Image: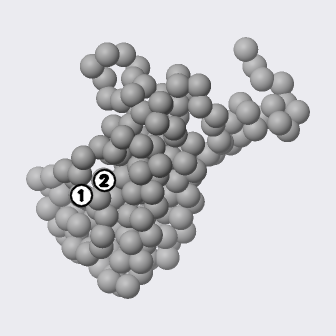
Amino acid sequence: MYHTIEEFLAEWTYESDSTQQILDLLNDDSLGTRVKEGERSLGFLAWHIVISVHEMMSRVGLDFEGPQHDAELPTAASEIARGYRKSNQAFTEAIRTQWKDANLSDEHDMYGEMWSSATTLNVLVKHQIHHRGQLTLLMRQAGLPMIGVYGPSREEWAFYGGEIPK
C-alpha cells in the first residue's frame, strides 16, 4: 500500500514505462489478434489499459485530460500508444499537483465499494499489470517482438547469449 505520492510515483513510473514500451511494439495488423473467436482482441485490451487510467482516477477526484471510458477503439496502433502516453503524462502531473500525501486516505465509492485513494492507486497498478500480461501473450501469437518487463524476453535472452529452452 502507498503511504506517499512519491512512493506511488516510483512504482508507477516503472510500470507505466513498461506498458508504454509494450504498446509501442504493437502494429495495426496485430490489433485484431484474439486467443479465439469471441474473446477480447489485442487492440481492445490495449485500449482498455489506456482508458482505465482516466476512468479509475477521475472517480477519485483527479482532474486531467485522457481518453474517456467510452472513447472509440482506434484502428491504428500508434493512436493507442499515443493515447496512453498523453493520458499517463496528464495523470502523473495531476497527482503531483492536485494531491498531497493525506489524500491517499480519502475514501471514494469505487464500483459499489469504499476504497481509499491508496487502494485505488494499488488496483490501478495491478489492473495494468494484469492486462499487460494478456497483451504479451497475444503479441506472441501475432508474431511481434517482445521486451522483458521483470526479466529478459526470449529475444533479449538470446541477444545476451543465453540458450532458449524449448
Label 1 element class: loop
Disc ID at residue 159: none
Helix or strand or loop: what does disc 2 sit on? helix
Name the foreground residue: 62 vs 105. Answer: 62
Mark pair 1, 2: CA separation: 6 Å
Relative to 57, does residue 31 appear above or below in the rendering?
A: above
**Would residue 133 be visible to someone looking at this image?**
no
Q: Quadrant of the C terminus?
A: top right
Q: Which residue is mark 1?
A: 68
- The relative height of residue 38 versus residue 115 in the rendered view (above or below) is above
Residue 134 screen position, x and y as percent: 44, 33
> Which residue is at 73% across, 33% downward?
155
Q: Position of residue 36 (x, y in %)?
A: 36, 16
Image quarter where the N terminus lies is bottom left
Asked whether 10 or 26 is in front, the reply is 26
In the image, what residue occupies the spot 81% across and 31% down?
158
- Report if the CB atoms under discs 1 and 2 are less than 8 Å apart: yes
Which residue is disc 2 drawn over? 51
Which quarter of the figure has residue 148?
top right
- Mark 1: few/some/many CA within 10 Å (<14, 14-19, 20+): some
Q: Is residue 129 left or right of residue 50?
A: right
Residue in view at x 42 percent, y 25 percent: 33
Kind of residue at badge 2: Ile
Place of residue 112 in the rendered image (x, y in percent of width and height, measured from the top left):
11, 53
